[in-house]
Image: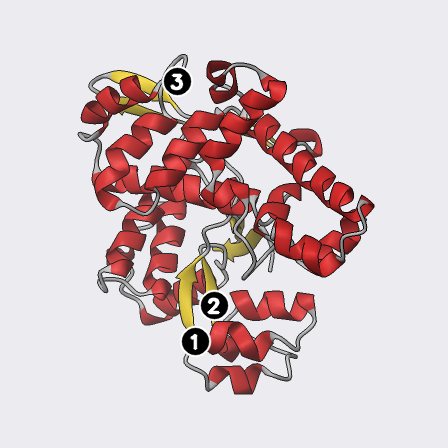
């Protein structure tokens, strides 16, 4: 797997991106439109990939009549792996014994095309499915136009190996509450693209305007935020908040608003100041408080199993902290 796919047409070398982080906003929107068609059973994952290649290259698939040319297009499209991951039965149980790098290959490349992987023939007999890869760290819809006005979305920056994001705490919490509710998409977009100082009331009013956006654009905004949220809590130091499985839920997933008010009472500023705190700063403070609580409980001789029960953190994370 690679972030770029090189291929030759009539002696000329072309490069095709194979990464969420490198596609354009336009191609992201067209992909989301195709995802909606796929969800309705109108397109297969293979055709979604073919459409992506054609959109990037400026080709019209309807004009490709030659069978060999279409087969070459299909083979090229098969190399586009970034939009999907492969899900195997029982939560990928068949992959549990594999080394991380091999497992990564099996999650991206259909088993029929895996070479040099001993388990490939077995995997090909399983009822596997393609699911959307909703985990990346980039703002792919930086601006939207509503009633001839431009609204700029939250910014994400990962340059110099440092993550920053312009989202405010209250914005994040209010979006998190309505994620996964299709009828709330205009409000979700209004919250994320709110100009100037954020307030719940003005976002609610702005949602009436955002309701006029095309459905696929609203879906793209929601998908982008979900992907960033997934990245934040699986690929960064903030994964500590979602490390537990069956233990007590973490503050960020169920009690974020209460945690916000606790920060106010703990001397981080009045509630208005805390609501407008930067999201990354907020998560950093919560993470430190969680780590400090582990050290405090350990200092009073509490057993690790009891610390795990109290904090919702698994034992291996507690061992790392201590």
Determine whether the residue tagged by mark 3 lies in a helix, strand or loop.
loop
* Distance between mark 1 and mark 3 Cα atoms: 44 Å
Residue 97 position (above or below residue 270) = below
Looking at the rendered image, the quarter that the N terminus falls into is: bottom right
Judge left or right: residue 205 versus residue 131.
left
Residue 96 drawn at (x, y percent) = 62, 75
Res 55 label: none
The residue carrying mark 3 is 198
Residue 122 drawn at (x, y percent) = 54, 87
Q: Residues within 10 Å of mark 1 (few under 14, many from 20)?
A: some
Residue located at (31% from left, 65% from top): 44
Q: Residues within 10 Å of mark 3 (few under 14, many from 20)?
A: some
Q: Nearer the viewer, residue 221 or 22?
A: 221
Residue 34 drawn at (x, y percent) = 29, 52
Labels 2 & 1 near each other (Cβ < 8 A): yes
Residue 11 drawn at (x, y percent) = 53, 54
Residue located at (52% from left, 20% from top): 274
Q: Quadrant of residue 94?
A: bottom right
Q: Nearer the viewer, residue 32 or 200?
A: 200
Residue 84 position (above or below residue 138) = below
Determine whether the residue tagged by mark 1 lies in a helix, strand or loop.
loop
The residue carrying mark 2 is 86
Sequence-earlier tag: 1 or 3: 1
Q: Nearer the viewer, residue 148 or 237?
A: 237
Sequence-earlier tag: 2 or 3: 2
Labels 2 & 3 near each other (Cβ < 8 A): no
Determine whether the residue tagged by mark 2 lies in a helix, strand or loop.
strand
Sequence-earlier tag: 2 or 1: 2
| Comparing labels 2 and 3, the label whose residue is closer to the camera | 3
Res 128 label: 1
Total marks drawn?
3
| Comparing labels 1 and 3, the label whose residue is closer to the camera | 3
């Amino acid at each position: 797997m690679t972030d770029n796919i090189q291929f030759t047409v009539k002696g000329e070398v072309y490069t095709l991106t194979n990464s969420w982080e490198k596609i354009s906003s336009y191609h992201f929107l067209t992909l989301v439109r195709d995802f909606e068609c796929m969800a309705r059973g109108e397109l297969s994952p293979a055709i979604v990939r073919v459409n992506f290649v054609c959109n990037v290259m400026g080709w019209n698939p309807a004009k490709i009549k030659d069978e060999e040319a279409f087969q070459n297009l299909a083979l090229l499209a098969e190399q586009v792996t970034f939009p999907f991951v492969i899900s195997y039965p029982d939560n990928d149980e068949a992959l549990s014994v594999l080394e991380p790098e091999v497992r990564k290959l099996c999650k991206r490349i259909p088993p029929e095309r895996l070479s040099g992987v001993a388990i490939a023939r077995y995997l090909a007999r399983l009822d596997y499915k393609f699911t959307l890869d909703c985990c990346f760290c980039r703002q792919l819809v930086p601006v939207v136009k509503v009633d001839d006005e431009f609204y700029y979305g939250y910014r994400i920056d990962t340059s110099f190996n440092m993550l920053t994001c312009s989202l405010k705490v209250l914005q994040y919490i209010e979006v998190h509450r309505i994620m996964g509710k299709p009828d709330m998409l205009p409000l979700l977009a209004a919250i994320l693209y709110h100009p100037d100082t954020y307030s719940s009331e003005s976002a609610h009013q702005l949602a009436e305007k955002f309701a006029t956006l095309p459905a696929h654009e609203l879906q793209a905004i929601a998908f982008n935020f979900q992907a960033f949220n997934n990245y934040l809590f699986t690929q960064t130091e903030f994964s500590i908040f979602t490390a537990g499985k069956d233990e007590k839920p973490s503050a960020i997933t169920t009690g974020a608003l209460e945690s916000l008010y606790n920060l106010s009472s703990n001397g981080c500023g009045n509630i208005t100041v805390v609501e407008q705190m930067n999201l990354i700063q907020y998560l950093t403070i919560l993470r430190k408080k969680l780590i400090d609580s582990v050290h405090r409980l350990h200092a009073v001789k509490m057993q690790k199993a009891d610390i795990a029960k109290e904090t919702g953190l698994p034992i291996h994370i507690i061992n790392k902290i201590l």
